[in-house]
Image: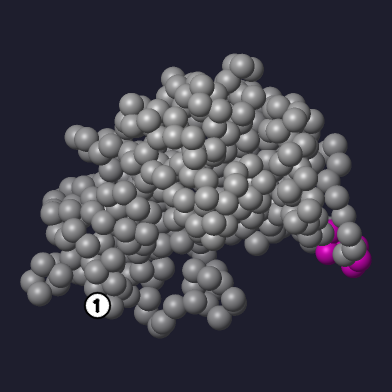
Amino acid sequence: MYDFEHTIDRSKTDSVKWDIADNELPMWVADMDFQVAPEIVEAIKNKADQAVFGYEEPHADYFNAVAEWYETEHHFRPKTDWMMFVTGVVPAISSIVRRISSVGDNVLVQAPVYNIFYNSIVNNGRHVLSNDLVFDDGKYHIDFADLERKLSDPLTTLMILCNPHNPVGKIWSRDDLSKIAELCNKHNVKLLSDEIHGDITFNEDGYTPVFSLPEDLIQNVMVTVSPSKTFNVAALHAATIIVPNENLRNQVNRGINSEELAEPNSFAIPATIAAYTKGHDWLKALKQQLMTNRTLVEDFLKSELPETKLIKSDATYLLWIDTKNISDDSEELANFIRKETGLYLSAGSVYGGDGTDFLRMNIACPESSVRNGLSRLKKGIELFLKK
């Protein structure tokens, strides 16, 4: 029903991902190469046919679509009065950093983590404080003793959580999330959870939205969600902040409104409603294709590149590949592979923590592209080991 075997040529179309040299293959930025769900395209075409694109704002149908999506896909319905529309997760995070913390404060993250978090913190005059994830026996876990020490620092006023975690693909358990929320409450630290990757999970139970925790644990909580990664509609600039506590919600909302982050473009609202009300079958088919691609990569690395190891994960279309047996400088390795083979991967070093030992690969593309990328990866690593 849906075509995940073919793609379209996005070179010379202002695409960030495909602004590359001839013969290069981009498998870095979190941007899928699949065409979006046809229901989204239809909604955009219908809106375009109106031929007037003035100021707009979301109404009950938008927020109900978000609530119903989370009820159906993730078994918890957030209240619509908890929600605020924003034009993107990243600008929302930056706005929250400015509104909730003060210049000179610590904002806690868990490295290796999405690199743009660092920009939102440092560019606003705050300090990054990392509770580095512990990598042990091929798996990541949280050092809760270290987490509490850092949350107890009087200068730590905000924690940014990645749930599920990018780049390591970890789905935090309900127990982990409860412990994090309890510690944030104990030390009066606000908790901002970026859950943009929450729809793309491969385990039986999916992921746990932080706003679904018991009421006493979510009074310091802010959650950002968006269809942008799920449906590859980042250019539409649509996201939602979910804040259960009214006082905190009002505080966040003042920042959003003052920075004009609540003004959607004309296509954001109908496209999001279409995605969240009609996109369930498309997402199911997408995840089946991604699972096929993940298995392909895992089998290839085991048989053809035993020097590497794919880190087991249950979420995202971004794979975290252990390359410490090849190099402890992922930037050098990624640059070499790109120069020699045209394969463009993300160097793990940009995510902090132990990222110098890893490469990140985006497999949200046709199987033929994955095979092409793996062939280039093998060639690049073999050449790197010979040099």
Q: Name the residue beneath numbered marker 1.
A: 340
Where 60 falls versus 86 (above or below)? above
Residue drawn where x is 64% and y is 55% of the image = 91
Percent of width and height locating residue 126:
52, 52
Does residue 268 appear left or right of residue 139 in this picture?
right
Where 23 falls versus 156 (above or below)? below
Q: How is the image coloured?
A: one colour
Q: Nearer the viewer, residue 116 or 290?
A: 116
Q: Nearer the viewer, residue 124 or 70?
A: 124
How many residues crowd around disc 1 within 10 Å: few (fewer than 14), some, or many (20 or more)?
some
Percent of width and height locating residue 27:
40, 63
Does residue 348 appear left or right of residue 248 in this picture?
left
Residue drawn where x is 67% and y is 46% of the image = 99
Bounds of the magenta segment: 47-52
Percent of width and height locating residue 274:
74, 46
Q: Residue furthest left?
A: 386
Where 145 falls versus 15 (above or below)? above
**Does the segment drawn in magenta span residue 48?**
yes
Q: Main secondary structure of the magenta part?
A: loop
Percent of width and height locating residue 292:
38, 46
